[in-house]
Image: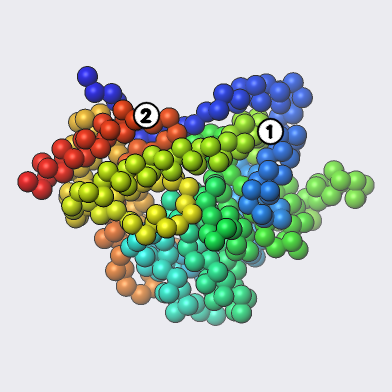
């Protein structure tokens, strides 16, 4: 009897329960306690960002980015349409118009060469989403943006433990965000982080996170009482989630290494199959094996393969439906230029199970199912 294989099985270190119990014993439940500070310091060391703030989600961190960039009605924000809705919503909530540009078919990231032409005098922010922990060319985007007074926000939701030329993703632009959702390599169920790479933005970021108050300076003894000084909201991760996360963050290198071994095995075995397109160039990036995807001839073949894998007890999924094709996308955004790859490539893409506890037997079961399905589809 074949084993049922889920698409994801969230990683656990075994330390989570004891850490949460420790936080309870400390009587720390709200955010910004002992474990929050531990996580933030470790993330600063890992990423090289001068200040990291834990947030309830990557969505929350993106909303903070929109506030820190002073996005307002009439501004434009450039990003790719092959994206999670939070990347657009964070700026739409501030009144911005989203401008989508096409993607690169190799990485599924925004095509850096199309960004400059999409800039207008209303452009306030460029969002660089690193799909699957594979880097955009953020340095090129910064070279385009900074002379024009435009901000670059790295949506590094997938990117814990991923780098570009030795720099951790999320630490290169003006701001970066990371997700610790249960679907990510390292998680706390639901959580995120904001990376503040401009030192003179740190104080305001702490104010925005504390509901627009200067509570952070009050806790440091700088002011006698805190008060409302700016816009903001409740953007603190609770302490129990931070305690859960602390046990995981210590294992970033171990988790990345195990996932990379699985990624490499997939790549080696499936590269021998015709009609299954793998992104060979991705192997040259310092990614973190967050996603392994292959591309089929078209959406019909992809859906057929998903069904055949399902019959073999294997969960495999496609990913984002391009935002510009949605009702809200048509309302709050426009597509600049031609959709050459965004829709067609997203319809070909199929993600395979990839998680820390995936066993060699499960891996071989997936690969054998893919080989059999390949023969059935193309014979």
- Foreground of the two, 73 or 363: 363
- Foreground of the two, 84 or 186: 186
* 82 to the left or right of 230: left
Note whether 198 is above or below 28 in the view shown.
below
Residue extending farthest to the right is 224
Residue 364: percent from the left, percent from the top? 28, 33
* 326 to the left or right of 189: left
Residue 208: percent from the left, percent from the top? 71, 53
Note whether 229 is above or below 193 in the view shown.
below
Going 71% across and 53% down the picture, which residue do you hit?
Answer: 51
Please tell me the numbered disc located at residue 359. Answer: 2
Please tell me the numbered disc located at residue 84. Answer: none
Residue 36: percent from the left, percent from the top? 70, 38
Going 65% across and 21% down the picture, which residue do you hit?
Answer: 18
Q: Nearer the viewer, mark 1 or mark 2?
A: 2
Residue with the mark numbered 1: 239
Judged from the image, the secondary structure of the residue bearing numbered disc 1 is helix
Judged from the image, the secondary structure of the residue bearing numbered disc 2 is loop
């Amino acid at each position: 009897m074949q084993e049922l294989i889920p698409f994801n099985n969230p990683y656990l270190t075994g330390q989570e329960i004891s850490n949460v119990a420790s936080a309870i014993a400390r009587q720390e439940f709200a955010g910004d306690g002992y474990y929050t500070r531990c996580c933030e310091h470790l993330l600063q060391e890992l990423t090289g960002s001068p200040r990291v703030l834990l947030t309830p989600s990557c969505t929350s961190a993106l909303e903070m980015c929109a506030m820190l960039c002073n996005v307002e009605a009439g501004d434009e924000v450039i990003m790719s349409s092959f994206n999670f809705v939070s990347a657009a919503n964070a700026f739409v909530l501030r009144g911005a118009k989203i401008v989508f540009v096409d993607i690169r078919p190799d990485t599924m990231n925004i095509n850096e060469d199309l960004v400059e032409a999409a800039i207008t005098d209303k452009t306030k922010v460029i969002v660089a989403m690193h799909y699957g922990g594979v880097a955009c060319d953020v340095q090129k985007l910064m070279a385009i943006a900074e002379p024009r007074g435009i901000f670059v926000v790295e949506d590094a939701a997938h990117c814990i433990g991923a780098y570009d030329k030795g720099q951790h993703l999320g630490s290169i632009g003006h701001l970066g965000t990371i997700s610790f959702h249960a679907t990510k390599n390292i998680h706390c169920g639901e959580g995120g982080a904001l990376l503040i790479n401009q030192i003179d933005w740190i104080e305001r970021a702490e104010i925005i996170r504390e509901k627009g108050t200067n509570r952070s300076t009050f806790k440091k003894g700088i002011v006698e009482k805190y008060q409302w000084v700016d816009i903001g909201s409740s953007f603190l991760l609770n302490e129990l989630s931070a305690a859960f996360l602390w046990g995981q963050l210590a294992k970033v290198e171990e988790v990345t290494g195990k996932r990379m071994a699985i990624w490499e095995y997939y790549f080696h075995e499936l590269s021998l199959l015709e009609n299954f397109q793998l992104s060979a160039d991705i192997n040259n990036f310092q990614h973190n094996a967050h996603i392994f995807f292959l591309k089929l001839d078209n959406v019909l073949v992809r859906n057929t393969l998903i069904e055949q894998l399902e019959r073999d007890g294997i969960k495999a999924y496609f990913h984002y439906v391009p935002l510009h094709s949605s009702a809200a996308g048509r309302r709050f955004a426009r597509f600049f230029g031609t959709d050459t790859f965004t829709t067609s490539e997203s319809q070909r893409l199929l993600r395979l199970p990839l998680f820390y506890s995936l066993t060699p037997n499960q891996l071989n079961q997936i690969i054998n199912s893919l080989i059999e399905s390949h023969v059935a589809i193309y014979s």
